[in-house]
C-alpha cells in the first residue's frame, strides 16, 4: 500500500468516526431537549396547582418544588426560563395530569388555561353563610365578599341596597374561575338573576303589585314556612291575601331571622315582641330583605300562587310538615290549640 492510499484510508476512517461522534452528539442533544421539553415530568402527588393573584415565578416555583408537582424541578426550571414563563405568571387553578411534559404544563400556565370551579348552592340562610361557602371554594375570602355586599355604593349600581342584595343569589350550579374577584362574582350572579327575571315573570310580579326583589323577599318567607314544595303556592296565596288587606304577615320565620336563633322550634309570645324591622308580628308589609336564600320553587310559587280566601295557617299537629289553613280567626284558634297541645305532649318548649 502506498503512502498516499494509506493516508486516504486514515482520513476516511477519521471522517467516519467524526460523523459517528457528531451523530451521537446530535442524538444526545435531541434526547437532552426531549427530556426537558417533551418528556413526562408532572407527578401524581397533587390534583391542582393554585397560583394566587400577585404571585411571581419564584413563589410558583417554590410551590411546585415543595408540593412535589414535578419529578424533576431542574428541567422544569430550565424549560420555564427558556419558554419565558418567568415573566408571564397568571393566577388560577390549574388541573394537573400525571405525565404531562414540561412544555405542555408550561403552555397551560402561559395561556392561563385553568379549570373552573363548579359552585352549587341552595338553602344558605344568611349572606354570611354564602360568603363562607364561597370563601372555601374560590380565592377571595369571606370577608372580602361580605365587604362588597355591605357596600351601599356598589350594590346601588345594580338596583339593590344592603338589606335586599342577597336576593340576587339564585340557587343553581355555576362554573366560576377560582381567582374570580368578588366584583366579577357578583356580576356573574347578577347576569343569572337578570336572565331568570324574564318579561313574563316581571309581568306576573307586576300583576300582584310586587317588584322582583319583593317577590324574592316574600318567597324567602314562603320557603321558611313550607317543608313541602307542593304547599308553597297555597302559603304564597295566603300571604298575598294579607298584603292586599294591609294585615301583618305574622310569620314565624321572620321572627326567627330577627332573633338569629335558628334552632327555635316553638316561637313564643315574647319572641313576637322582639324589636326588629324583620319582625312581621310588629310591622306591616314585607321585611327589608330576605330571611333566607329563596329557592326557585318558592319564587315561582309566589308568581303562580294559589287563589284562596285563606288568612291564617298553623302547622299540623301530626308534624307532617303540612299546615292547617283557615279563613277566619275562630277556626285558626282551633288549629293553633291542636298544634300547641301536640308540642306540649312532646315536651317541645322552645
Image (cartoon, rainbow, N blue to C red):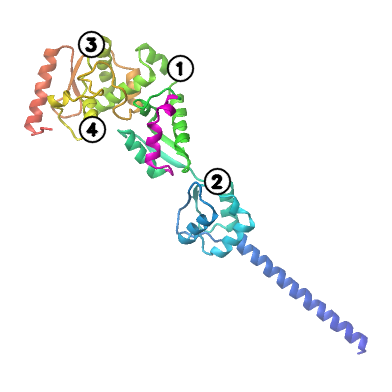
Between marks 2 and 1, how big is the CA–CA gap?
Answer: 37 Å
Residue 58 screen position, x and y as percent: 53, 57
Res. 258 visible in picture: yes
N-terminal label among 3 and 1: 1
Q: Residue 199's mark? A: 1
Between marks 2 and 3, how big is the CA–CA gap?
Answer: 58 Å
Q: Nearer the viewer, mark 4 or mark 3?
A: 4
Q: Residue 309's mark? A: 3
**Secondary structure type for disc 1:** helix
Horizontally, residue 257 falls left or right of residue 328, namely right
Q: Nearer the viewer, mark 2 or mark 3?
A: 2
Q: Residues within 10 Å of mark 2 (few under 14, many from 20)?
A: some
Residue on which the image places disc 2: 113
Residue on which the image places disc 4: 260
Q: Nearer the viewer, mark 4 or mark 2?
A: 4
**Secondary structure type for disc 4:** loop
N-terminal label among 4 and 2: 2
Res. 315 visible in picture: no
Q: Which residue shows up at 24% across the image and 29% down it?
A: 257
Relative depth, front residue between 319 and 120: 120
Which residues, given as a range, are shown in magenta? Answer: 138-156
Q: Nearer the viewer, mark 3 or mark 1?
A: 1
Between marks 4 and 3, how big is the CA–CA gap?
Answer: 32 Å
Amino acid at each position: 500500500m502506498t503512502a498516499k492510499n494509506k493516508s486516504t484510508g486514515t482520513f476516511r476512517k477519521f471522517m467516519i468516526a467524526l460523523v459517528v461522534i457528531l451523530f451521537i452528539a446530535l442524538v444526545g442533544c435531541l434526547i437532552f431537549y426531549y427530556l426537558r421539553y417533551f418528556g413526562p415530568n408532572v407527578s401524581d402527588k397533587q390534583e391542582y396547582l393554585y397560583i394566587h393573584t400577585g404571585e411571581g415565578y419564584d413563589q410558583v416555583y417554590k410551590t411546585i418544588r415543595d408540593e412535589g408537582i414535578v419529578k424533576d424541578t431542574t428541567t422544569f426550571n430550565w424549560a420555564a426560563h427558556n419558554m419565558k414563563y418567568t415573566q408571564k405568571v397568571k393566577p388560577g387553578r390549574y388541573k394537573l395530569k400525571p405525565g404531562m411534559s414540561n412544555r405542555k404544563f408550561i403552555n397551560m400556565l402561559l395561556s392561563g388555561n385553568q379549570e373552573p370551579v363548579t359552585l352549587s348552592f341552595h338553602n344558605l340562610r344568611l349572606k354570611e353563610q354564602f360568603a363562607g361557602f364561597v370563601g372555601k371554594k374560590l380565592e377571595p375570602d369571606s370577608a372580602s365578599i361580605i365587604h362588597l355586599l355591605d357596600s351601599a355604593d356598589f350594590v346601588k349600581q345594580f338596583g339593590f341596597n344592603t338589606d335586599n342584595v342577597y336576593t340576587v343569589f339564585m340557587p343553581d350550579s355555576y362554573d366560576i374561575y377560582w381567582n374570580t374577584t368578588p366584583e366579577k362574582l357578583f356580576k356573574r350572579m347578577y347576569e343569572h338573576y337578570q336572565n331568570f327575571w324574564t318579561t313574563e315573570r316581571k309581568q306576573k310580579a307586576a300583576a300582584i303589585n310586587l317588584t322582583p326583589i319583593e317577590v324574592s323577599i316574600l318567597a324567602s318567607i314562603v320557603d321558611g314556612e313550607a317543608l313541602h314544595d307542593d304547599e308553597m303556592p297555597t302559603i304564597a296565596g295566603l300571604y298575598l291575601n294579607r298584603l292586599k288587606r294591609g294585615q301583618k304577615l305574622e310569620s314565624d320565620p321572620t321572627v326567627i331571622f330577627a332573633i338569629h336563633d335558628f334552632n327555635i322550634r316553638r316561637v313564643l309570645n315574647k319572641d313576637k315582641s322582639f324589636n326588629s324591622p324583620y319582625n312581621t308580628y310588629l310591622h306591616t308589609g314585607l321585611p327589608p330583605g330576605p330571611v333566607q336564600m329563596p329557592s326557585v320553587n318558592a319564587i315561582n310559587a309566589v308568581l303562580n300562587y294559589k287563589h284562596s280566601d285563606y288568612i291564617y295557617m298553623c302547622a299540623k299537629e301530626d308534624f307532617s310538615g303540612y299546615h292547617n289553613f283557615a279563613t277566619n280567626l275562630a277556626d285558626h284558634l282551633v288549629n293553633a290549640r291542636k298544634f300547641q297541645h301536640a308540642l306540649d305532649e312532646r315536651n317541645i318548649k322552645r
